[in-house]
Amino acid sequence: MKTKLSVGQRLFLAAYNPMFATMFGWHQDAINEEYVRTYGVSGLLKFGKMIGDVLAVLGKRYGEAEANHIVGFAGLLNGCGFCGVGHNLTANVLLFRDNGSIFPIDEQEIPRLQRLDDDDLMAEVESRLKGTKFEKELDLLQRMYALRSENAEGTTEEDTYLLLALDMWLVNNECTIKIGLDIEPEEVPIFAKFSRDSELYARYREARSQGE
């Protein structure tokens, strides 16, 4: 049974959720409610800032699209459909918007990939990305998997960045995974201010379908 929110918490969310949507471009009311239920209002604000800070650091090093792929893959490894789909969707649409590229892994496949065992998951990721212009991303994802699932020790500057994404979800998935377990990929928004650009999304999906 879910813990009931206090009157003060409900009043906060009634004001915060519309402000969040205006500032960032998408709604995640259920996620925000779960954060408040689990960690309180201060926890929601703290974790929101942490996510923004990590994405900013990764974005400065890798670019916005690749940063979202890294964070999305970390979410996938931790079992969160909401984060795994949302950040990969954001990355995929950014790639399409900025240079017309179609990433070989469709974000709508994330729930299926999450049900695979580790060996099959990584084999499929490698089969999709090897020999493409996204081999750099493949190297990063393979290293992230080693850090997350094979207990490899972080020894390089690159590892420090990948561990940022992994460590962020160790805390955040406590809340997001509860919502992401049953969510359909089509229900997950783009995590960017252009989330409401339905024409861009439609063109992206059409381009992806033509390439399959």
Image (cartoon, grey):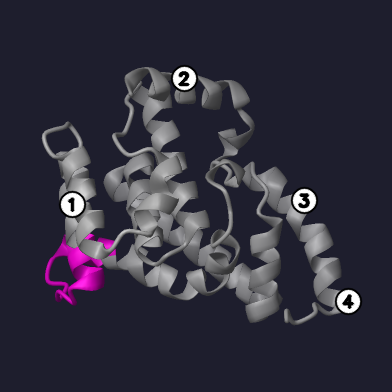
Q: Up-down: is 154 above or below 20?
A: below
Instruction: Specify the quadrant that holds the N terminus.
Output: bottom right
- Mark 3 lies on residue: 18
- Mark 4 lies on residue: 7
Q: Answer with left or right where residue 110 lies relative to residue 200.
A: left
Q: Earlier in the sequence, mark 2 or mark 4?
A: 4
**Residue 94, position as x, y percentages in the image:** 42, 33
Instruction: Specify the quadrant that holds the C terminus.
Output: top left
What's under tag 1, amino acid-wise?
Ala
Q: Earlier in the sequence, mark 4 or mark 1?
A: 4
Q: Are marks 2 and 4 in contact (CB under 8 Å)?
A: no
Q: CA distance from mark 1 to mark 3?
A: 42 Å
**Badge nearest the viewer, 1 or 2:** 1
Q: Earlier in the sequence, mark 3 or mark 4?
A: 4
Q: Are marks 3 and 4 in contact (CB under 8 Å)?
A: no
Q: Secondary structure at mark 3?
A: helix
How crowded is the residue under tag 4: few (<14 C-alpha within 10 Å), some, or many (20+)?
A: few
Q: Answer with left or right where residue 36 lies relative to residue 139.
A: right
What's under tag 2, amino acid-wise?
Glu
For residue 206, which numbered disc appears in the image?
2
What's under tag 3, amino acid-wise?
Pro
Q: Secondary structure at mark 4?
A: helix
**Residue 192, position as x, y percentages in the image:** 54, 41
Give the magenta part as a residue range. 144-162
How crowded is the residue under tag 1: few (<14 C-alpha within 10 Å), some, or many (20+)?
A: few
Q: Is residue 89 magenta?
A: no
Q: Secondary structure at mark 1?
A: helix
Can residue 56 be seen here? The reply is no
